[in-house]
Image (cartoon, rainbow, N blue to C red):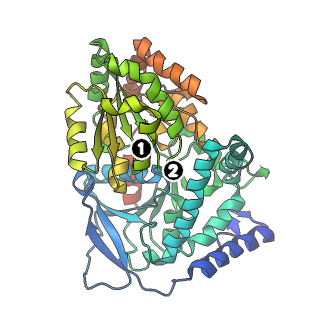
Amino acid sequence: MADKSAVIFGNKQSAGVVRKAEKSKAKFIKKFGDDSSVAYVPVIEDNEHIGDILGVSDIGIKTASDKTSTFDTEKGIIVGNIRMGFGHYRISMAIASCANALGYKPYWMDLNSYKDTTCTKVISSQNDLYSLGSRISQKSRLFNKIVWEPMNYEGFRKLSYNAADQKNAELMAPVFKNIPKEIPVVGTHVWPAQAAIHAGMNTVVNAIPDNWPMALHFAEGSTHTIQTQFAYQGYKICNGMDGNKVLNEMPENSLVYTGHYVDHELVSNIEIDCERRVRRIEENKPMRFLLTIGGAGAQKEIFAEIIKDLIPRIKAKQATLYINIGDYKNVWNDLNKAIPEMKDLTTLYFDDWNKTRKFAQDALEGDVTGIHLFCHENIFEAVYATNLLMRSCDVLVTKPSELSFYPVPKIFIKRIGGHEQWGAIHSAEIGDGTLECRDTAHTLQMINLFLKEKAMLKNMCTNIINNKKAGIYDGGYKVVELAMKGGNV
């Protein structure tokens, strides 16, 4: 196999870039070892949390096992992912959901869950750094301006960054060693896609999440999919990925526009969910706001201000709050201290998955008042709780990351990383979300505008239904169909 760090889509990298990539791999080997000679055994395991909802089974990796696992090589499809924040897990759930709905068998392969492998150790170390950077960026304007925004906006954009990632991904390939090569792989983060290519998997589809084109997301040898036409043009010509140079473009059929990656359960119920939203607002029912705190655990200060502002409306039954704090129980303690009057208004759903699911189901047609706060230690439940709650909420309040592409009315709070702003721009352009509210004052203005003017919510619901008719939310299905066709356009 050609060295994917030296030449990227025909764009030759300098000797210095290649040396830097090799040093990066060598540093990880020195720190975590090289297990390329280990014959890992894949073991299919039940997923107790979302298995019954999405038809998904987990792929465990063992050094030895007396259990023989038989993969479905005709209907099987591997969803390769990592836990880095909640976004890539959520996209994986969308792909698994669509695969299940289309009659295929999704296998969940989290490269950040195999604790004894070099693969997971490399990913975890980088994940820890990213999470730390996310949190610091929310506390330090100087760090955000000088380090975090430039790194997320321009640093990850460069081909030289992809060169290092490709070299590091060679250390992730061993976990694929004994998985049947004919099963297609959909990577919802670039590292599983790169690792699958290095491991010789026959079909790899690389589901790119961001609307801002970045070379970070390249896995040459895979079929790349994107969610917007803006991203298609930028990725196609490798726009701005090596200064102002005119670069060789991506080859024909290596890049495909699919539309948004969204769960079947959400797409198939768009009309009825939007009709219920409009009916509630016409009947002057409390407007339901869903607040989500992502996997980095940042931005709780913004949410505290939102909650303080909404409490009088909640008491007057003009607003209702759903709050998903993921797996960050400390956030509840912090909110409790910051907003003492919140406690008496709040119903807690802590690590009771059945209770959470029942609430989400009952809320579709029933009335809901007060504050409902959800926290689940298990990562699947922590992420998927938001998906369950989206159907019955009226407005999702979130940073403009992977949730930018979901078919629910959205208010966007301040981004974490410059690349995320393009999710809000796209959502505002197709009319299913607001502009990015870059400070608390503008966020509160937008929330109160929704409460004051019925047209805000009604217009978004109309746009969401029209977007569905245009196929904008069909990306999950198209990614699966592409993978099952061998990645051929």
Q: Where is residue 468 in the image (x, y as percent from the top left)?
A: 38, 32
- Please give left or right for residue 119 compared with residue 367 in the image: right
Number of numbered labels in the structure image:
2
Q: Position of residue 380 (x, y in %)?
A: 34, 54
Q: Which is nearer the eye, 470 or 316?
A: 316
Q: Nearer the viewer, mark 2 or mark 1?
A: 1
Q: Which amino acid does label 1 sit on?
A: Asn
- Give the residue displayed 25% in from the left and 49% down from the top: 353
Q: Position of residue 221 (x, y in %)?
A: 55, 65
Q: Are marks 2 and 1 in contact (CB under 8 Å)?
A: no
- Give the residue displayed 27% in from the left and 62% down from the top: 47
Task: Give the residue pinned by disc 2.
Answer: 296
Instruction: Determine which quarter of the picture holds residue 441.
Output: top right
Secondary structure state at the residue bearing disc 2:
loop
Q: Please tell me how crowded label 2 is: few (under 14), some (14-19), or many (20+) other residues with Cα within 10 Å.
A: many
Q: Which mark is residue 333?
A: 1
Residue that lies at the very extreme toward the bottom in this rendered image: 37
Q: Where is residue 289 in the image (x, y as percent from the top left)?
A: 38, 28
463 to 378, vertically: above or below: above
Q: Which is nearer the eye, 301 or 442?
A: 301
Q: Which amino acid does label 2 sit on?
A: Ala
- Give the residue displayed 28% in from the left and 37% down from the top: 268
Q: Which is nearer the eye, 235 or 386?
A: 386
| Residue 19 seen by the camera | yes
